[in-house]
Amino acid sequence: MATQSDEVIAYVDMDGVLVDFPYDIEDVHETIREECKDWCVRTKNHHSDFNGLFSTLSPKCGGAEALDRLEAGGYTVYLLSTAPWSNHSSSSDKRRWVEKYLPNLPEKRLILSHRKDLNRGALLIDDRPNNGAKEFGDFEGQRWIHFGSDEFPDWDSVLTVLNC
């Protein structure tokens, strides 16, 4: 059995990697789209700050299976995501999302942070360089895998490179 000191930790972002995040307001779930649009116009805030948004999001195809394959391949998987500071329901919505869509992920494997670069592990799989993701690979032995890039357009490409 692996001890904490010899764990090979893989951090995986949620939005845009495991979660089908609506980067355009027109892609917000139909049940809240009009209310969200009105709120954005009134408040001048981004739709990601709309309370309840994260409770409506769907999983990306292949994400849950990829986490299972990473775990089977010897990685200890943690979700490392950022919850928009102005969206007060986002933290609890993300936790409920994990419980609903990732039943195989062990409990307490969700980390919410605005500084992903402060975490130590072998790799971070993230679709954007924000919140320290790009800087994650600055430490010796760490690697940022830019999910959705030309090199890593999908889960198959990531898992192939990681031999999982």
Image (cartoon, rainbow, N blue to C red):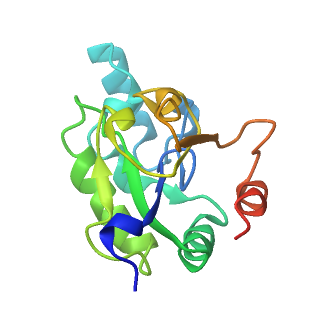
Residue 35, visible in the rendered structure: no
Q: Position of residue 53 (x, y in %)?
A: 36, 44
Tell me which corner region of the image, top left, top right, bottom left or bottom right, holds residue 55.
bottom left
Q: Residue at x 50, y 41 (%)?
A: 28
Quarter of the rendering occupied by the N terminus: bottom left
Q: Residue at image x 39%, y 22%?
A: 46
Q: Nearer the viewer, residue 63 or 51?
A: 63
Residue 151 percent coordinates (x, y): 80, 40
Which quarter shows the C terminus?
Answer: bottom right
Left-right relation of 67 to 96:
right
Q: Is residue 76 left or right of residue 157?
A: left
Which quadrant would residue 106 be assigned to in this image? bottom left
Q: Position of residue 11 (x, y in %)?
A: 46, 53
| Residue sitting at the far top | 44
Give the residue displayed 40% in from the left and 60% down from the top.
78
Q: Quadrant of residue 116?
A: top left
Q: Is residue 115 above or below residue 120?
A: above
Relative to 39, is 107 above or below? Answer: below
Q: In the image, 144: left or right of 55?
A: right
Q: Residue at x 39, y 33 (%)?
A: 117
Across and down, in percent, residue 48 comes to 38, 33
- Front-lying residue, 58 or 129: 129
Question: Residue most toward the left?
Answer: 88
Instruction: Depth check: give the residue in front, 19 or 119.
Output: 119
Residue that extends furthest to the bottom in the rendered view of this protein: 1
